[in-house]
Structures are given as C-alpha cells and as structure tokens.
Amino acid sequence: MVDRWTVSDDKMTYSFTLRPGLKWHDGQPVRAADCVVSIERWGKRDTLGQKLLEAVGEIRAVDDNTFTITLKTPFPLILDALGKLSSNVPFMMPERLAKTDAYQQISEAIGSGPFKFVKEEWQPGNKAVFVKNSDYLPRKEPPSFAAGGKVVKVDRVEWLYIPDTATAAAALNAGEADWYEQPPADLVPVFAANKDVVVTTVDPLGSHGTLRFNHALPPFNNLNCAKRC
C-alpha cells in the first residue's frame, strides 16, 4: 500500500506515503487515518507490535495520503515489524473497523487487496469465496511473497476446506480432495502407505517449534500431501 517512505537522519521519524488511487473493498478510498488506527490496533495484540508501540511517541496522519511514526526511543526493527508475515500480521483496514476493540473480532473482512471476500457465500467450516477486485491497482515490480505486483488472472476462487483432521485425511485418501497442507505427523504414515498420494517436504529447514519424531520423518508442519495425477 505504501508508495514510498523516508526516515529522518536520527532514525526517529518515519514518513509513509500511500500509493494513489487505492480503494477499500467497500469502494471507499484508502486514507492515512485508516493505517494509523490499524497499526495501533495491531500493536495491542502482536508481541512485536507491543514492543514497537512502547518505543512510539506518536503515529499521526499528516494528510489523507501520508502518515508518520515518531519514536521516543530507537527501534531498529520498525520496518520488520510493519512488514512481517507471521502472526499477527499488521493488516490494514478501514478506520471504522480498526476502531473495533483489539480483543474483539471485526464484523467485516474489508481490505484493499486483489481479491474480495464474499461474505454472503461464506459457509463456516466448509467454504470461503473470493472474487476479483476490479478496483485493485497492482504494483509495478514483480511479486515477491506478500510484496510486489499482484495481478489477478482468475475471476473467482472457491476455497473448500475440512477442519476435522480425520475427515480431511479420509477425503484425501479417497481421492475426494487433492491437497492437504501441514498434516498432523501421526497421519503421515497413513498417507505414505497410499500409492496414490505424494508426501513431500515444502521447507526442508522447518520452522521454529518444529517437532521431529525420528530421522525418517521430515518436519511435520512443513509437509504437503497431494493426490497423484
């Protein structure tokens, strides 16, 4: 969402200018005030955000397109905090939603990204639907994880999911599902025994807190299991 940013010589004031023409999924323009309240709400819940807010003197909207973060004590990880992908992610939302108590669930899923959540078709525990956001303005640079240009090439995405692990495992083994990301470790031998299922390690480095049962099993929370085609 940020077009450019600058930092003062003493590294105590950061200025962020939003990309022009951005709109929320409800059609309203993205404003700096939205980002200010969103960052403040996120900072109350996230561990790194809490540390950041301890160092912040003021977060202020200069105008509709620019906001500043002024520190009262140095905080070298400010950009890492605002750009991090791990939970809790500092997602931006309209000011009216960001004003929701940090410990209460927001009432709407309104962002500014390339896909819009279709609340009317949401089936909790079964299906989530997303449609192309025709108002989205991609960045010009190539995509890189959560950064870079996001060019939508499909009009609609239906995400069918099965929360219960046993039911999900049975569906994959029966050929009713095609993909099971991060399955529980005790299900890996079951999938491995099925000649129609491929078990593969997506990230050989694992992640913090990864549990290895023995040297024969890769990190369980970095596995993907997919039906053979």
Image (tube, rainbow, N blue to C red):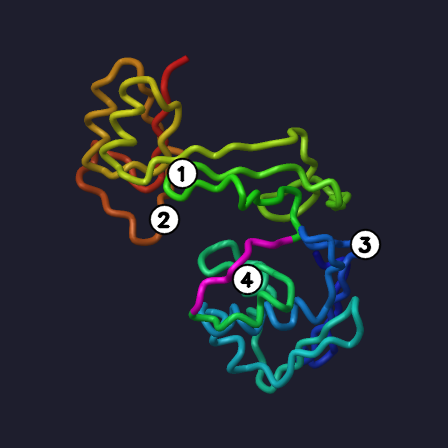
Q: Disc 1 marks which amino acid?
A: Asp
Q: Which residue sits at x=61%, y=61%?
A: 92
**What x and y, as percent, mark residue 167?**
25, 31
Q: Is residue 69 above or below residue 154?
A: below
Q: Disc 4 marks which amino acid?
A: Pro
- Of tags 3 and 1, the one toward the viewer is 3
- Rounded to the nearest angstrom, the CA distance separating label 3 from label 1 is 37 Å
| Residue 34 occupies quadrant | bottom right
Residue where numbered disc 1 is placed: 203
Q: Which residues are magenta?
A: 104-111
- Of tags 2 and 4, the one toward the viewer is 4
Residue where numbered disc 3 is placed: 21
Residue where numbered disc 4 is placed: 90
Q: Disc 2 marks which amino acid?
A: Ser
Asked whether disc 2 touches disc 1, contact meaning CB atoms under 8 Å apart, the reply is yes
The answer to which of marks 3 and 2 sits earlier in the sequence is 3
Residue where numbered disc 2 is placed: 207
Q: Within 10 Å of the Cα at label 2, are there few (<14), some (14-19), or many (20+) other Cα atoms? A: few
- In which quadrant will I find the N terminus? bottom right
User: Viewed as shown, does residue 188 lie left or right of 85?
Assistant: left
Mark 2 secondary-structure assignment = loop
